[in-house]
Amino acid sequence: MSLILAMVSFSLAMSISPGPVNFVILSSGANYGIRKTFYFVSGATIGFTLLLVFIGLGFYKVIELYPYFLKYLSVAGSTFIIYMGYLIATAKPEVKIEKQSRPTFLQGFLLQWLNPKAWLACVAGVSIFSSPEGDTRFFIFSLIYFIVCYISLALWSFLGAKSTIILNSDLRLKVFNWVMGFLLVSTACFLLYTQLK
């Protein structure tokens, strides 16, 4: 039971803490609502879980052999995150936004695979919760992470949707989009700096 609690705690801490994916979901929830953000949340959750399984089933050995892989990934991932930040910062600040494009399932999926934070969380999780006796413990961890990640990201979406009580004018929404875009770009720059220093 203590192992399950440790898995839940680790998954929750990594999923609910602020990061690039969470900022996109918060912004999307505020701009498009929970229902339209659900696709991005689903893509991000499934993308992360598949990344976790991919690393857990052997790719971590490649990372150990080629430690610079994560540095190259940080450059590519940070570039994509900066692009997402730009899209958020320049989104049209209209309170009625039904016709605007929203973050998609594919963007959520790709953002996880290009997100240095996601890779580091996966590597850490695999190293902590894998067992030389077999894959059962790892697959239990992956299932727990999937559930916790889905709930955590949905909560960010809910928080974004509820922020529309405050963001009830075009000007406020424009400022919010700029702040979210700036936070996303800043996060990408910080992740890049920590990997390349």
Image (cartoon, grey):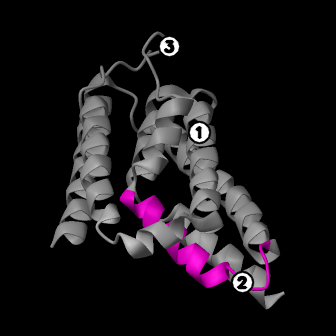
Q: What percent of the width, then of the height, locates residue 90?
A: 24, 27
Q: Is residue 79 left or right of residue 62?
A: left
Kindly identify the amino acid type of the residue bearing the numbered disc 3.
Answer: Glu
Counting every numbered tag in the picture gives 3
Q: CA distance from mark 1 to mark 3?
A: 21 Å
N-terminal-most mark, 1 or 2: 1
Which of the numbered marks, if any, corresponds to residue 131?
A: 2
Q: Is residue 9 left or right of residue 95?
A: right
Residue in the image at 30% along x and 19% along y: 92
Kindly identify the amino acid type of the residue bearing the numbered disc 2.
Answer: Ser
Residue 29 visible in this rendered orientation of the protein: yes
Camera-near label (1 vs 2) is: 2
Residue in the image at 40% along x and 29% along y: 168
N-terminal-most mark, 1 or 3: 1
- Do callouts 1 and 3 mark residues in contact (Cβ within 8 Å)? no
Which residue lies under the disc numbered 3? 98
Quarter of the rendering containing residue 96: top left
| The C terminus: image quadrant | bottom left
Task: Farthest residue to the left: give it.
Answer: 197
Q: Height in image: 102 above or below 96? A: below
Camera-near label (1 vs 3) is: 1
Q: What percent of the width, then of the height, locates residue 20?
A: 38, 51
Q: Secondary structure at mark 3?
A: loop
Magenta segment's dominant SS is helix
Q: What percent of the width, then of the height, locates residue 10?
A: 60, 76
Boundaries of the magenta span: 116-135
Which residue lies under the disc numbered 1? 43
Q: Secondary structure at mark 1?
A: helix
